[in-house]
Image (tube, helix red, strand yellow):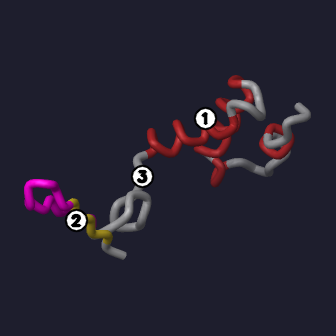
Amino acid sequence: LATRVDIHLNDGRVLSGEQADAQGSPELPYTPDVIENKFRRLVSAQIPVDQSERVMQLVARLETLPNLKELAPLLCKCV
């Protein structure tokens, strides 16, 4: 979904810009750093830093984990 912005200046000029794809869309995906930083920011008030870092480590190798026994408890504020 394209987005277009036109800014009309007092001197009559019009500045225009268009973005064909939204950041985070399949066509313009977020980088791993952006995703990790957003995760850290969103969980920082909920769980300790060491806990959130461990969650990220486990999620990074989620497909190779034998089960979710170690990950599941870390997703709770109560740990």
Question: What's the amino acid at mark 2?
Answer: Asp
State the residue at coordinates (15%, 54%): 10
Mark nearest the camera among 2 and 3 is: 2
Query: Which disc, if any, is residue 30?
Result: 3
Q: Is residue 25 left or right of residue 13?
A: right
Task: Name the spot of residue 60 as percent of width and height, x first.
Answer: 59, 44
Task: Name the spot of residue 17 as percent of width and height, x first.
Answer: 20, 62
- Alpha carbon separation for disc pair 2 and 3: 26 Å
Question: What's the amino acid at mark 3?
Answer: Tyr
State the residue at coordinates (32%, 69%): 3
Per the rendered image, the range of residues in magenta is 8-19
Residue 12 inside the magenta-drawn segment: yes
State the residue at coordinates (31%, 73%): 2
State the residue at coordinates (71%, 48%): 65
Question: What's the amino acid at mark 1?
Answer: Arg
Question: 77 or 13, which is in the foreground?
Answer: 13
Relative to 50, does residue 59 appear above or below in the rendering?
below
Q: Earlier in the sequence, mark 2 or mark 3?
A: 2
Q: Is residue 10 left or right of residue 61?
A: left
Q: Do callouts 1 and 3 mark residues in contact (Cβ within 8 Å)?
A: no
Report the residue marked by disc 1: 40
The residue tagged with tag 2: helix, strand or loop?
strand
Question: 37 or 68, which is in the foreground?
Answer: 37
Report the residue marked by disc 2: 6
Question: 53 or 3, which is in the foreground?
Answer: 3
